[in-house]
Image (spheres, helix red, strand yellow):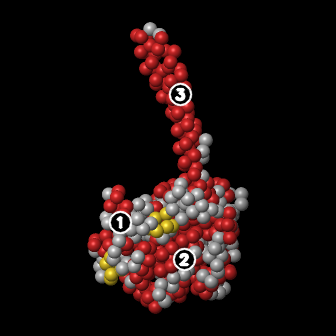
Amino acid sequence: MSNSAKAEAVLALHRFGMGPRPGSIAAIGTDPRGALIAELDRPLVLTAAAVLPTSAKAFRTVADANARRTARVKQAQQQARKQQMAAAAPAMSEDQAQAQGQEKQGQAQDKDAAEIAAKQAAEAVPDPGRPMYLQEAKLRTEAALAADIGFAERLVWFWSNHFCVSANKIQSMSGAYEREAVRANALGRFVDLLLAVEGHPAMLFYLDNLESMGANSIAGINRSRGLNENIAREIMELHTVGVRTGYTQDDVISFANVMTGWTLVPPGADPQHGGEFTFNPRLHEPGGQTVLGKRYEQEDAEQGRAVLRDLAAHPATATHVATKLARHFVADEPPPVLIEQMAKTFRDTEGDLKQVAIAMVSSDEAWRGPPSKLKRPSEWVVGVVRATGITTVDPVRYTGGQELLGEALWRPSAPKGYPDDEASWIDGVGRRLDIANNFAERITGMADPQVIIEDVFASEIAQEVKQAVGRAESRQQALALLFMSADFQRR
């Protein structure tokens, strides 16, 4: 294998994959581009996911736990009040002046006792959402660590961020949402991915569409509730055509009316199907709507699906998606030629995302720039662990580290997801040193920095980094220096 071939293999693993791991450079070195494309032909499934609940089941489990907790708290409060009344009865026969002072003291003590009893009752029913979140995080991360290259996993991560929800708002469904809606469609057609994510209960919950109702709907008339524009605005601005592409506030309102009635089955009303998608006609604004100059007269959920299909096929969507993909994988300012190549493929194939990904890695434009793009924290952490050959993680430690680095798993601060530009992450690079030092300390006995340089990276690391590692005072320091180098930080 020539040096240039090795260098291209390293670039392929960093820019498009999850980073080199033992044996990966040799495995793809003869044809890195072909290896990337070949990985897209493999099933993008998580076999171990069979042990995890569906999003609806997870939602019902948490709802049931919350209901039991509330019931126990109320029982504890009722019991405390009964005890207070029983204890207060004898005090009525005491001297009045003395009793008044004792009554105030007793009331304070009774209140404290009631609060303690309520707290103990609540703690007796643990939150099942947290363990499910950690199980999902472990499975997702270990899939990235075990991947031969990780190109397909990176695409899942990209689309999950593009169509993000937040575990801060819907923790129980966050991991299952990615598996069910994103992973299942990440290499299919964009329209199918769009329909899956927008109709998923996690997205409807996250963007507050559950009780959005048209002014002339049955519920709107009877309950005087209002329309929520969130889902319509985010679909157009973030998920499909993008900003400044010609849609107006009237389009947003009309589309929001189209999406009324898209909700989920209340878990308390249906123990078998609670948390699943349903269309509620009582919430839906009756009649046709005009979105981007086209009239939609369909009834029920088909009206929304029709708008989504047209948005998926809109030329601006092709450009928006191509730009975001190129920015994520290649450069903060990706070559316009590359964007147009990818957008054309999107249009020509009716949004075949696998073909768009192939068009990206097949283009010389995607390979010309130096590895100067700063990795997001999640990419850097996984790349560091992959280089050591470790394939299992402690999800508590991992998610805690991601939070410390500012990219908490499935917890973006806004519907636009985590940013993909260097300016958003450069100030946090210093915090990576703490993670690098901590990880290096834990693996000192099992990871040799020279082996990582020579075998995992096939010596395709900057000479100054090799020298710094060689002069390090300890193996821990050498590993930390290596992990903090540009060879690990950039792609």
Q: Secondary structure at mark 2?
A: loop
Q: In the visual, does 455 lie left or right of 350?
A: right
Q: In the visual, does 484 lie left or right of 338?
A: right
Q: Position of residue 204 (x, y in %)?
A: 45, 65
- Can residue 444 be seen here? The reply is yes
Q: Position of residue 422 (x, y in %)?
A: 43, 68
Q: Position of residue 460 (x, y in %)?
A: 60, 76
Residue at 51 percent across and 15 percent down: it is: 90
User: Foreground mark, 2 or 1?
Assistant: 1
What amino acid does circle 3 point to? Lys
Q: CA distance from mark 2 to mark 3?
A: 58 Å
Which comes before the other along the chain, label 2 or label 3?
3
Q: CA distance from mark 1 to mark 3?
A: 46 Å
Residue at 49 percent across and 15 percent down: it is: 91
What amino acid does circle 1 point to? Ser
Q: Are marks 2 and 3 in contact (CB under 8 Å)?
A: no
Nearer the observer, 176 or 18: 176
- Can residue 432 be seen here? The reply is no
Q: CA distance from mark 2 to mark 1?
A: 35 Å
Local crowd size for mark 2, using a 10 Å CA cut-off: few (<14), some (14–19), many (≥20): many
**Location of mark 1 (residue):** 217
Q: Outermost residue, right direction?
A: 446
Which comes before the other along the chain, label 1 or label 3?
3
Residue at 37 percent across and 82 percent down: it is: 316
Residue 82: which disc? 3
Which comes before the other along the chain, label 2 or label 1?
2
What amino acid does circle 2 point to? Ala
**Location of mark 2 (residue):** 186
Picture quarter with the N terminus: bottom right
Local crowd size for mark 3, using a 10 Å CA cut-off: few (<14), some (14–19), many (≥20): few
Nearer the observer, 27 or 172: 172
